[in-house]
Image (tube, rainbow, N blue to C red):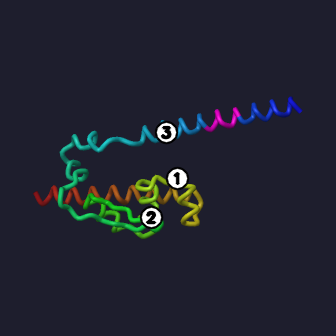
Amino acid sequence: MMECQERFDSFCKTVLRNHAHNYDQMLRRRRKRECFSEDICEDKRFQRLFSVAPFQDTYVFRVLDMEVSVEDVLLGEALQELSEERRTIVLLSYFLDMTDSEIGAYLHLIRRSVSYRRGTTLKQLKKYLEDLANEEKREC
């Protein structure tokens, strides 16, 4: 009986150690992908994309019976151009910090589909914002 208890204790410690290791890896991966807007704003072309004027309109989107507020007008416009499903994926992922599996469960999709759609949506958003920047550059 004691040997069984010791094996179970060892198993539990291994599970906890592996979980802590996986969590640390996830945090490291997230830190590599994220950056501060101050780092990006050093480039003059991107300053207007990341600054918020004091009396600016705010875009409000409803997701999971919650209101997600986007204060950047350009990002709000870009998100509004997306389909409902793609906008929901981006808002859940980046504003509500949900994992692909959690988003997939909410939208009845597999995790890989959520990941793929988020990737293509980010490319679509990038193109939309670059086109806006190019239009303003031509106007000046």
Tag 1, which secondary structure?
A: loop
Distance CA(mark 2)–CA(mark 1): 13 Å
First-in-chain label (1 vs 3) = 3
Q: Which residue is mark 3?
A: 27
Seen at 24% across and 53% down, the residue is: 49
First-in-chain label (2 vs 1) = 2
Point out the residue furthest to the front here: 2
Position of residue 111 measured from the top left corner of the image (x, y, whole percent): 57, 56
Q: Which residue is mark 2?
A: 88
Frontmost residue, 108 versus 134 = 108
Q: Amino acid at mark 2?
A: Thr
What segment carries the magenta color? 13-19
Vertical relation: 25 (above or below) 96: above
**Most common SS among magenta residues:** helix
Numbered tag placed on residue 24 in the rendering: none
> Which quadrant is the C terminus positioned in?
bottom left
Seen at 48% across and 66% down, the residue is: 64
Position of residue 121 measured from the top left corner of the image (x, y, whole percent): 42, 59
Q: Is residue 110 found inside the magenta-colored segment of the image?
A: no
First-in-chain label (2 vs 3) = 3
Vertical relation: 28 (above or below) 76: above
Tag 3, which secondary structure?
A: helix
| Apparent side of residue 139 relative to residue 109 in the rendered image (left or right) | left
| Apparent side of residue 48 relative to residue 104 in the rendered image (left or right) | left
| Apparent side of residue 109 relative to residue 56 in the rendered image (left or right) | right
Q: How many marks?
A: 3
Distance CA(mark 1)–CA(mark 3): 13 Å
Q: Which residue is mark 1?
A: 99
